[in-house]
Image (tube, rainbow, N blue to C red):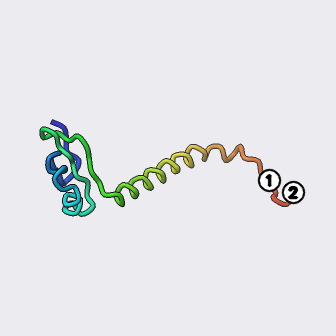
Amino acid sequence: MKTVLANYSASISELKKNPSALIDESEGEPIAILNHNRPTAYLIPAETYETLMERLEDYQLGLIVNERQDEKIKAVEVDIDEL
């Protein structure tokens, strides 16, 4: 059996009946949508998704910064007044 990665769950039938009520009940937490007692999707509020995407972007930018740390010794120093 697959692990359910949410504290809240609902069947597809429950989701069809009243999706807004499910979102309100979960108070911003993810909701596992189950089909035959197996998670098929996760439903999260828009604000939670936006926060997740911002954190993912920050993480990816951090990886780029770490990769480029070694390039610092190859940098050429330039005086802006000389440009």
Residue 52 coordinates in the image, percent (x, y): 38, 54
Which amino acid type is shown beneath numbered disc 1? Val
Using the rendered view, name the quadrant where residue 2 is placed: top left
Q: Residue at x 18, y 56 (%)?
A: 18
**Residue 2 to residue 25: above or below:** above
Label 2, on which residue?
82
Which amino acid type is shown beneath numbered disc 2? Glu
> Could you say whether the residue bearing mark 2 is in a helix, strand or loop?
helix
Residue in front for this viewpoint, 50 or 13: 13
Q: Residue at x 19, y 54 (%)?
A: 7
How crowded pointer 2 is (Cα within 10 Å; few <14, some 14-19, many 20+) is rated as few
**Residue 33 to residue 19: above or below:** above
Which residue is situated farthest in the left direction here? 36
Please give left or right for residue 41 compared with residue 14 in the image. right
Q: Which mark is residue 48?
A: none
Which residue is situated farthest in the right direction here? 82
Separation of residues labelled 2 and 1 (CA atoms): 8 Å
Residue in front for this viewpoint, 77 or 52: 52
Using the rendered view, name the quadrant where residue 80 is placed: bottom right
Label 1, on which residue?
78
Q: Which quarter of the rendered picture does the C terminus lie within?
A: bottom right
Using the rendered view, name the quadrant where residue 48 is placed: bottom left
Mark 2 and mark 1 in contact? Answer it, CB < 8 Å: yes
How crowded pointer 1 is (Cα within 10 Å; few <14, some 14-19, many 20+) is rated as few
Please give left or right for residue 47 compared with residue 18 in the image. right
Residue in front for this viewpoint, 18 or 50: 18
Q: Residue at x 27, y 61 (%)?
A: 28
Residue 44 coordinates in the image, percent (x, y): 29, 54
Residue in front for this viewpoint, 17 or 81: 17
Which residue is situated farthest in the front direction here? 17
> Could you say whether the residue bearing mark 1 is in a helix, strand or loop?
loop
